[in-house]
Amino acid sequence: MKPKLSLHAAFVAAVVIICFATTMLSTTKAQEKVVKQITAAEEPVVSPADKETIKRYQDRVKEYVSLRSSLKAKAPKLAKDSTPEQIQAAETALVTLLRTSRAGAKPGDIFSPDIARYIRTTLKREFKPEEKKEIRKVVLENETNIPVTLKVNYPYPDPKEFVEMPATLLLKLPTLPKEVKYRYVKRTLLLVDADNNMIVDYMIDALP
Amino acid sequence: MNRIAQSVLTVFVLLMFGFLSPGYGQAVSRGTAGTKVGLAAKPSLPLSLPLKEGSVRFAIMGDTGTGSKQQQQLADLMRQYRDAFPFEFVLMMGDNLYGSETPADYKKKFQDVYQRLLDDKVKFYATLGNHDQPNERFYEYFNMNGKEYYRFSEGNAAFYSLNSNYMDKKQLQWLESELAKDTADWKIAFFHHPPYSSGGKHGSDKQLREVVEPMFLKYGVNVVLAGHEHFYERLKPQKGIYYFISGAGGKLREGDVNERSPLTDKFYDTDMSFMLVEIVKGDMHFQVISRTGETVDSGVLANQKKKP
């Protein structure tokens, strides 16, 4: 009698284990990362020629970041519990060093014609009309008729409130290192320093 | 009967002129930011929160950084409420400083306003709004630890401060990796731009919603707090997630809420306000208090995991 019970119990246990294992496997497969799903849906299709254009652009950005890092080493460091005076001193010092080192910088040095063309084309192509409308609503929400002067090596216009970068649009643009960010002022796309909003470069007519 | 009628009429007249208004130091109009307003209310401090031992207690305010008299009045009221409801920290929904950000501005628009709470060792956890310079993340009293986005926990709640000005892939990847391993009972995300809103000036940030909502749903975020709109709104749960807007801590956009919005459960857009929250195990109690001491919303929300 006893052996029959043992066999039966073993059989049931085996079935349970197999079912459990199958469930776990299918659950794991289903747990595809959300960011992967979002970015896969959002990232633009890029031709080999465009890949080269993007790589050259990102190399120029890296050059700026490399310069910035070397200059930042000479500027006051910011601790995570800094006073406003320390924040102001660090910002001013870094901007001054950057402006001096990049004295000859002009619009288009980083946003060269080929990457500017790629960005304009991509943004026009990748969004449906209603999505473009939504993006323009976000970017142009506070647009006024007051002209805004943009100058490379100078901060993002101070009294102007910063415009949110539409999240889905960000995913279409070439990625940047954390030291720089994209910003919009009206229809102009800027590359700004992430810490002090100094304009590194800009390109006009960049809104889809 | 005549005497009764006279008494009723007298009381009515006195109420009309505010002399019997409960909790008022001076009879004044409710006013709005910028109009003549008297002292902040000396409230009788009606509290809708249970005050249970071991609960997580905090305040929420947004779009504060004006340095105005009205912002100060609201801050004074928060301080008074702290005597009755000792909250440990404050969540700031962004636009922490408006306009210039010199050291004098930090002092005028934040430190001086909340000095009494700072003296009580209340911690402020900030997020960046569209008016905020990125280096605010280094400011000692914003407790951002030099980061644009960060997580901290208190009791059975985890709080995620996000930078909705710049929701790039890096931030999304960080958020996902944190949420995926988070076992807190309550996951609360706070950032500046509201994914859902009944505001006329701004409205729902659909762009942002498109990238963050799937993650919130997948990883069980319970509550989303935002500012940017200068009013208070409690939205109807959206796909099971609770949403609040608390953006009237220093500015007010009176009458901005679209009253016909199908999104709204409760709103208040005629004066500035702040929120108090108490999390007791699987329940989140909240109370919203106006600048003049009126409770304009309150309730309790059950943790979604707790619901049948």
Image: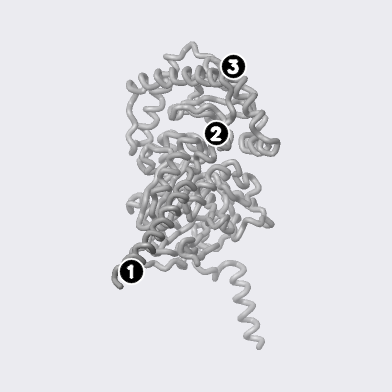
Q: Which residue is mark 2?
A: A171
Amino acid type at image mark 3: Asp
Q: Which mark is residue A114?
A: 3
Q: Position of residue B225 (x, y in %)?
A: 50, 51
Q: Chain of mark 2?
A: A
Name the secondary structure under disc 1: helix
Residue at 57% across, 45% down: B209
Give how far apart the Cα atoms at labels 1 and 2 are: 63 Å
Residue at 46% across, 18% down: A59
Q: Which mark is residue A4?
A: 1
Label 2 crowd (10 A; few <14 / some 14-19 / many >=20): many
Q: Which of the two labelled residues, at mark 1 and mark 3, occupies the earlier sequence position?
A: 1
Amino acid type at image mark 1: Lys
Total marks shown come to: 3
3 and 2 marks in contact (CB < 8 Å)? no
Label 1 crowd (10 A; few <14 / some 14-19 / many >=20): few
Q: Position of residue A33 (x, y in %)?
A: 48, 43
Q: Is residue A121 above or below residue A161?
A: above
1 and 3 marks in contact (CB < 8 Å)? no
